Image (tube, grey):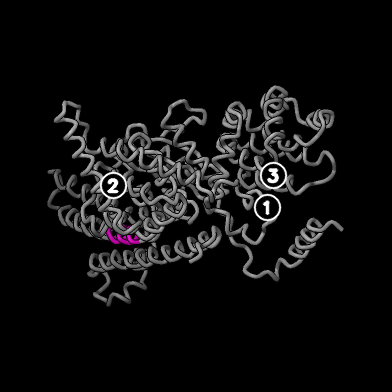
Amino acid sequence: MAHPGFFQRQASARRNTSFLVLLFLTAVVLITLAVCVVGYLVTRSETSGQPFHYWLLSSHGLITASAVVILICMGSLIRWVDLAGGGSRVAKMVGARPIDPDTRDSHERKLRNIVEEMAIASGVSVPELYIMDNETGINAFVAGYTPGSAVMVVTHGAITQLTRDELQGVIGHEFSHIFNGDMRLNVRLIALLAGILMIGQIGGFLLRSSFYSGGRTTARNRDSRAQMALGLLGVALFVIGYVGVFFGRLIQAAVSRQRETLADASSVQFTRNPDGIGGALFKIGLRSSYLDTTGHANDMNHMCFGEAARMKFSSLLASHPPIEQRINAIQPGLMARLKSRLRDTESGARLRTASGGNRPSAASSFASDTADLYTTASDRRRTSPAGSAIAAPVLEMASAQTLSERVGTISPEGEDFAIKLLQRLPSTFRGLLYTRAGAIQLCYALLTSDLTQKQQAECLKLLPNHSLFSAQPDLLAKLIPALQNIGEAVRFPALELAMPALRKLDPDERAELIKNVRKLVGADNRVTLFELALTSFLSRHLGADAERATPVRYRSYKSVMPALQRLLSLLARAGSGD
């Protein structure tokens, strides 16, 4: 069966989001009706015992229903605004810190290398990386509104306890969430549940207020009925609100389990190594995936690779299928093999202890035993005949019939291309891409590397005299030769590597960069295909609406026929020599 394309998966995610919103709207309607029933019982004596459906259409009923809907919408809106900063806001909410692109920590560099390989192989932007330093559990999640603005958060336990192939399996799982459009869905889930929770929180506040007021001695007889009514109303709202949250989490968990199963399968497809993600899940079973240092573990549970929070009714509310079920779904019999490998490792450890050696723990010996196996499997995969020739299909953009299928998909050729390309990058060149100044100069170098030195000097004079945005000859002298030596294939991969640094520019700086790039493009009064692609790429990823999903504006090609005619005529002209 053909794997669905990136754009098809994004469209499917939008449909899932619409269905999810419909389910939550149904929950809001039911909660509103439940609160209206409570209001009807409280005011029944004042309304002469009229039937509920008449009361619901009266001023009392309409005010009650409107108040409930407004409160739920306010709760969702407050959380939505709180998360409007995109993936970086979610990362900071859980106390994660950004990983320095030029980090010297070996575990962090391993993570960055894996992420960059998979990003270049799939043709999506390199996500910004964060780490939760104090979390010893094995977990990870991605957040953001669009694939181009995604951030990836990984726990310290994940990068230190997993082998390279196991970590690659986890990263493949998280990339699947980017490809399948799950990130916006996850943020919406958090916001919608916050709105429903608002009713329960107000009920709890009324309940506490009634107990507090009931403790006073003054005017107790006069106010006792009002206090009792307030307490009963609080109890009712508390119960309704938290029952609503319970069913909301049921919906959330059901959707999440489906998406997690898809992500596990996609990870195997991306890495071609079921033992990688299988071993990572097995280690979670041996140890833990809980997030213990943040108060947002319940909110983040459906976003994470493994269960982030301990909960009651886990069979109903768990956002992930059971570990054993996930492993066997990846490959039948994989769980039995992993258990057998662990038993063999423990037996070997006991023999070493009997002969005077130091016995490691079961989990650590399992990790050390499987590390060599996975490294060997990875090396075999990367040196196989299928990957020995660097992916002519990856380098040949003229193969248009499969272009849309390749976007957001990791193929063996694409991964081998990414690995070999990264190996060819000089360390100085690659290090510059991780700095703001180096990333800006890369944009200039991409537009001037094909020019003569005299032409380069003339073009760069167009740039303003600015400490950050003026041409810096010393940096350009390190970037341009590498671009010329490696060739055109390095252009967009290098730009992808520079995107985390470019995203650190503030809005005014981003606008200035785009303005300067357009100056260089217009210097010769003509626009090449690469120049058009570059300016479009920067506008899409660094523009004012960069982190917002692009809405579907047209449902039929007829309304954009003139634009299509111009596009097709341009392609016909560009594709012919006559």
Within-10-Å neighbours for mark 1: few <14, some 14–19, many 20+ = few
What residue lies at 29% left-to-right and 52% top-to-bottom?
Answer: 202
Pinpoint residue 492: horizontal percent, then vertical percent.
Answer: 64, 43
> Where does label 1 land, which residue?
397
Asked if the stretch drawn in magenta spans residue 175, the answer is no
Position of residue 243 in the picture relative to residue 174 (left or right): left
- Dot label at residue 534: 3
Q: Is residue 277 visible?
A: yes
Position of residue 384 in the picture relative to residue 50 (left or right): right
Within-10-Å neighbours for mark 3: few <14, some 14–19, many 20+ = many
Q: Which residue type does callout 2 highlight?
A: Phe
Distance Cα–Cα, label 2 vs label 3: 43 Å
Question: Residue 34 is drawn in which quadrant?
Answer: bottom left
Of residue 288 and residue 515, the one placed in the foreground of this image is: 288
Question: Residue 441 is drawn in which quadrant?
Answer: top right
Q: What element carries label 1?
A: loop
- Dot label at residue 282: 2
Q: What element carries label 3?
A: helix
